[in-house]
Amino acid sequence: MPQIKETAVYNLMIRDLPQNERPRERLQHIGAQAVATAELLAIVLRTGSGNENVLRLAERLLHRFGDLTGLARASLPELQEVHGVGPAKAVEIKAALELGRRLTAQTPEERPRITCPSDAANLLMSEMSLLEQEHLRVLLLNTRNEVLRIHTAYIGSLNTSVVRIAELFRPAIRDNAAYIIVVHNHPSGDPSPSPEDIRVTREIAKAGKLLGIELLDHVVIGHHRFVSLKERRLGFDES
């Protein structure tokens, strides 16, 4: 009877990718602002582990801690609990994020300011219009409508039964935000709001009134198009 050989796990390393798909080369050609967060983190980490490339490691880190804020709050031991992250990589991550925090603290005047729906849409359009799954993000704004930070609150189809409205406001309360803007994408490319989008908007607006944190808008992003539910008066009940 012939011996059955185990099938090797196929793992595409960064060096195996075309040059225009490698994080470092992409940053050189299209600029840092156009590169995805996972790719930037991969550049900081430089190398992956023995069984996965550095981009996959970066994606796992972001998924484990939720977003950059969660990553920044993680301790060195917590970072090292992730397979592929040793003491050196954990220190590199903390150092890079601390540099970003200090830059933001020194240059608050450079924070994006949201004055209309297109400002919010353009801030996230280049990345979110290409996502293959729905992401819901929350822009936290101060009293001058400046973006304090952007929080990824949920990944998956919007549904009032699974989206925890209270969780959307937790970062806003923690950061003492005055307003929030909710942004999510439609992978189909059509930004037309669904009935569930409107229901979610209504629930968020109601919760915001109770908490004293106003929902300024809910923006739906499609392929290079967007819809403002506030402009269309969908989910925003007239008071």
Image (tube, helix red, strand yellow):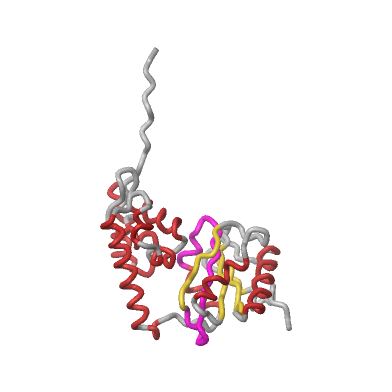
Q: Can residue 222 be spotted in the picture?
A: no
The location of residue 147, given as percent across then percent down, is 47, 79
- Please say whether residue 61 is one of the residues in the magenta stretch: no
The location of residue 158, given as percent across then percent down, is 62, 60
Q: Residue at x 38, y 57 (%)?
A: 78
Q: Residue at x 69, y 76 (%)?
A: 236
- Please say whether residue 140 is one of the residues in the magenta stretch: yes
The location of residue 148, given as percent across then percent down, is 46, 78
Image quarter (top left, top right, bottom left or bottom right) of the C terminus: bottom right
Q: Residue at x 49, y 74 (%)?
A: 122
Vertical placement of 184 versus 82: above or below? below
Q: Can residue 16 be spotted in the picture?
A: yes
Vertical placement of 112 versus 62: above or below? below
Outermost residue to the top: 1
Q: Residue at x 41, y 65 (%)?
A: 68
Vertical placement of 134 versus 225: above or below? above
Q: Which residues are the magenta region? A: 126-147
The location of residue 221, given as percent across then percent down, is 56, 67
Numbered-mark total: 0
Image quarter (top left, top right, bottom left or bottom right) of the N terminus: top left
